[in-house]
Image (spheres, grey):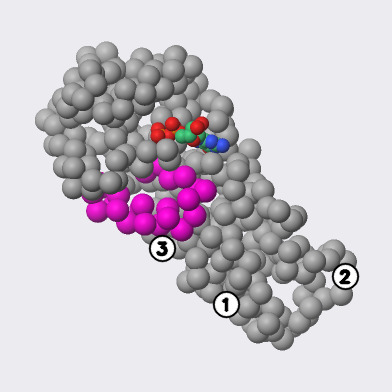
Amino acid sequence: AVAAPETSSPSLVGRLLGRKADEPRRVLDDDMLEQLEELLISSDMGVDTALRVTANMAEGRFGKRLSSSEIKNLLAAEIARIMENVAKPMPIYSKRPQVVLVVGVNGSGKTTTIGKLASQFKAAGKSVVIAAGDTFRAAAVEQLQVWGDRAGVPVLTAPEGSDPASLAFDALTKAQEDGADLLMIDTAGRLQNRSDLMEELAKIVRVIRKVDPTAPHNTLLVLDATTGQNALNQVDVFQKISDVSGLVMTKLDGTARGGVLVALADKFGLPIHAIGVGEQIDDLAPFDPQDFAAALTG
Ligand code: GDP
């Protein structure tokens, strides 16, 4: 699967040139660069990154005549270059159980992503346990149980309103006893009260470290790609309140704004472990910079 952003017209470059690749070449001048910048910005790349991409692309080529396909390929190569450094699958350690803390705002796709990951790990022969750490939303716990059933993975829960840290402690203890390979801990995502959330995440980390001082081994931040530039703010916030080790970008199947991934890579350089490309259990793909850049530029 490829992150193919659906655009209203065929492609960024197609929108710029409005003609086919075999038609006359255009001079790469200020006017064209400005148009390219605007197109990249409209894909949610943000101004700074869009300027950097176009400047790099124009280096040594200013004033030259280029065909649409040359422009597309040059832009795609620039974008892929930025993305190459961040395309990394989630690291798997020899430590068992490996503890994966999953953070992100409500609605970003945490529950779905945990289900998809659990299914992938299970298919790879790993035993997985999920802890439903968003104990404040009964619906979230139910939803996670549905995903656990789909993936064939046990979901440990606690009564509504109970302490997520205590659930995390029990879950890790049990995962250890059972000899599980991976424990994925869901967390609440109520950013409205940032200091509560910060305290809650800090407490989860403190408590699981009583069981395993090296935990958590991964802290995955799940981001909804359709929120555009807002995703950048979410990284800022979650980096302040947790030790984010990697990103999963969801909902790339339904957005023309995938440019935000380039901005994220450019600004934070955090690994992108996987991308969500739909609502089904198999709709989680490795992040492929070449495919992504080709899809984004059309
Ligand atoms: P949570 O509140 O962060 O746990 O978010 P959920 O996992 O409940 O997801 C919120 C909504 O986004 C649900 O309707 C999911 O089906 C949907 N969703 C999650 N990931 C994806 C994705 O990659 N693509 C699409 N199209 N929808 C997704």
Instruction: Measuring from the top left, give residue 278's x and y in whole percent.
Output: 57, 34
Q: Amino acid at mark 1?
A: Ala
Q: Is residue 292 left or right of residue 161?
A: right
Identified at 33% across, 36% down, the residue is: 102
Residue 43 sits above or below residue 2 on the image: below
Instruction: Measuring from the top left, give residue 6's x and y in whole percent.
Output: 67, 48
> At numbered mark 1, what does the secondary structure look like: helix, strand or loop?
helix
Mark 3 or mark 1: whose residue is earlier in sequence: 1
Residue assigned mark 3: 267
**Magenta part of the protein: which range?**
221-243
Q: Which mark is residue 8?
A: none
Q: Amino acid at mark 3?
A: Lys
Residue assigned mark 1: 55
Residue 32 sits above or below residue 222 on the image: below
Instruction: Measuring from the top left, give residue 208's x and y in whole percent.
Output: 17, 31
Q: CA distance from mark 2 to mark 3?
A: 36 Å
Identified at 44% across, 21% down, the residue is: 147
> At numbered mark 3, what does the secondary structure look like: helix, strand or loop?
helix
Mark 1 or mark 2: whose residue is earlier in sequence: 2
Identified at 32% across, 22% down, the residue is: 138
Residue assigned mark 2: 23
